[in-house]
Image (cartoon, grey):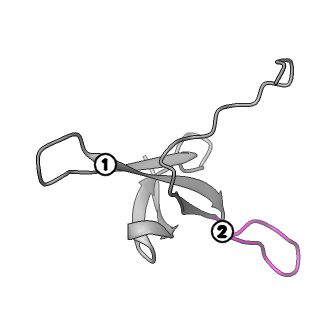
Amino acid sequence: MRSEPTPFEGGPMDGRSLPILLGPTGHPPKWYEIPVPNPDGTAPTVLLYERVPAGQTKRLGLQKGWKYTFRPTGTRPRPHWPWRKP
């Protein structure tokens, strides 16, 4: 499996970079969860990061890569199905 260093933005991991395993398409996972153990032994707190584009090149507008941004709510958004009523 191949991995690439992916930067993190926001939250406790701000400014750090971790080697993230890439999937079969060459992209890192859409969501990255980091469990942080609590000192009192209860269930660990989970930090949630979402994959977003890192930027674009100036000349052709190609995507440079990926980065992870912090989701302070700690929950993933529910999928929106167009055939369902609100």
Q: Name above or below for residue 86 compared with residue 62.
A: above
Q: Name above or below for residue 85 compared with residue 37.
A: above
Question: What residue does disc 1 label?
Answer: 45
The amino acid type found where label 1 is placed reads Thr
Q: Residue furthest bottom?
A: 58
Q: Where is residue 5 in the image (x, y as percent from the top left)?
A: 46, 66
User: Which class describes the residues within 10 Å of circle 1: few (<14), some (14-19), or many (20+)?
Assistant: few
Q: Give the range drawn in magenta.
A: 54-65
Q: In which quarter of the image is the C terminus?
A: top right
Give the alpha-carbon distance from disc 2 to disc 1, as whole Å: 27 Å
Q: Name above or below for residue 64 compared with residue 49.
A: below
The amino acid type found where label 2 is placed reads Ala
Question: What residue does disc 2 label?
Answer: 54
Using the image as rendered, state which of residue 56 and residue 14 is in the foreground: 14
| Residue at the spot 69% in from the left edge and 31% down from the top edge | 79
Q: Which disc is residue 86 wearing?
A: none
Q: Position of residue 78 (x, y in %)?
A: 64, 33
Quadrant housing residue 57: bottom right
Q: Position of residue 25 (x, y in %)?
A: 62, 43
| Residue at the spot 75% in from the left edge and 65% down from the top edge | 63
Counting residues from the N terminus, which is met first, the one under dot 2 or under dot 1?
A: 1
Q: Name above or below for residue 16 compared with residue 84.
A: below
Q: Between label 2 and label 1, give the one nearer the viewer.
A: 1
Using the image as rendered, state which of residue 71 and residue 2 is in the foreground: 71
Decide whether residue 59 is among the magenta residues.
Answer: yes
Quadrant housing residue 55: bottom right
